[in-house]
Amino acid sequence: MELSNLLEALLLVTGGLVLFGVWLSARRRDRRAAQALRVSEERFRHLTSLSADWFWETDAQHRVSWLSGGPAVAALFGSEMAHGRRLWEMPGVAVEPRALVEHFERLVELDAQMPFFDFMISRSDAGERRVHRITGKPRYDAAGRFLGYRGVGQDITEKRRSERALSEAKERLQLALEGSRASLWDTDLRTGEVFLSEAWAEMLGLPRAVTRTTVAELAMIVHPEDLARVAQVQLKAMKGGSADYAEEHRVRTPAGNWIWVLSRGSVVERDPDSGRALRMAGTNLDITERKRAEQGNAGEAQTATVREPSI
């Protein structure tokens, strides 16, 4: 009996240890799952904070039922009561009429319950216009009933201002290039690909169009007597020996003629760690007429010297 009792006690202890091990393993899995969930939620919050300035929800009638706080919301909606109103009905908030009609038809009249992107609303206070981009997706309950929309808002005022400034700068550059008949070029030194604006094709006697080529292909149409010199000044700029360069050289056209080109360029992008040149950009200008005039004047001067009458 004592042996039987001992065996029974051992079995109980062993079973208890097994159950404890199972319980401990489950606890560890739960902790790992909870930690992974926390990391995932933290990552989600971080990513959404980068992509949005504020968050919102509406009910099935598209009326705001929840808004996150923060300066962006305060700047857009001011002190007006936003809850219970539709986004396009907020006092002081403006929406482009055409965009509002399309948005209203899609979400309300057709009751399509489709996601929407890039719905723009704005507010102008003290002469400053703030523009926000709204994105939303429908939400449903467990039974599939439509509950309303949930989405994000982003203040894109500075982005719009930067895009407008960049567009204006490009327009001024294009006007300057057209006035000088120069061609803009941009070379990716990592791939050897080269972009040339429309005037380059025109210089070569081709229909005006953008040219996409390579450094190797361009080298093939540079005059053999000029190629080494051009490569040397470009290499010097790439290595940082000069801020930029300007070099005159000859280029063969598809018709077999030679034209003179003034090429200006500089490094516009370098690797932040190694300093290696990644991109170069500049302009090409057809100077054939000037070179012919210079050569003609030089010939006339030489002829005059040879024919100088004796006294």
Image: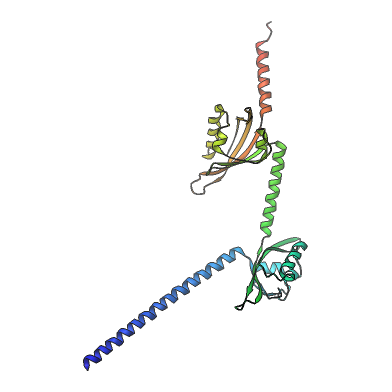
Q: Indicate the quadrant where residue 225 lies.
A: top right
Expressed as whole percent of the image width and height from the top left, the position of residue 18 reads 34, 81
- Residue 223 place in picture, x, y as percent: 57, 28
Above-or-below relation of 146 to 205: below
Q: Locate the C terminus and report the quarter of the image it occupies.
A: top right
- Do we see residue 78 in this rendering? no
- Apparent side of residue 33 relative to residue 85 in the rendered image (left or right): left
202 sits to left or right of 191:
right
Determine which quarter of the picture holds residue 280: top right
Q: Quadrant of the N terminus?
A: bottom left
167 above or below 128?
above
Residue occupying image coordinates x 66% and y 18%? 299
* Residue lying furthest right: 97
Q: Quadrant of residue 203?
A: top right
Which residue lies most toward the bottom here? 1
Count of marks, rendered view: 0
Q: Position of residue 130 (x, y in %)?
A: 71, 62
User: What residue lies at 39% left-to-right and 77% top-to-bottom?
Assistant: 25
Residue 113 versus residue 291: which sits nearer the camera? Answer: 113
Q: Residue at x 66, y 28 (%)?
A: 288
Q: Nearer the viewer, residue 44 or 8?
A: 8
Q: Is residue 299 visible?
A: yes
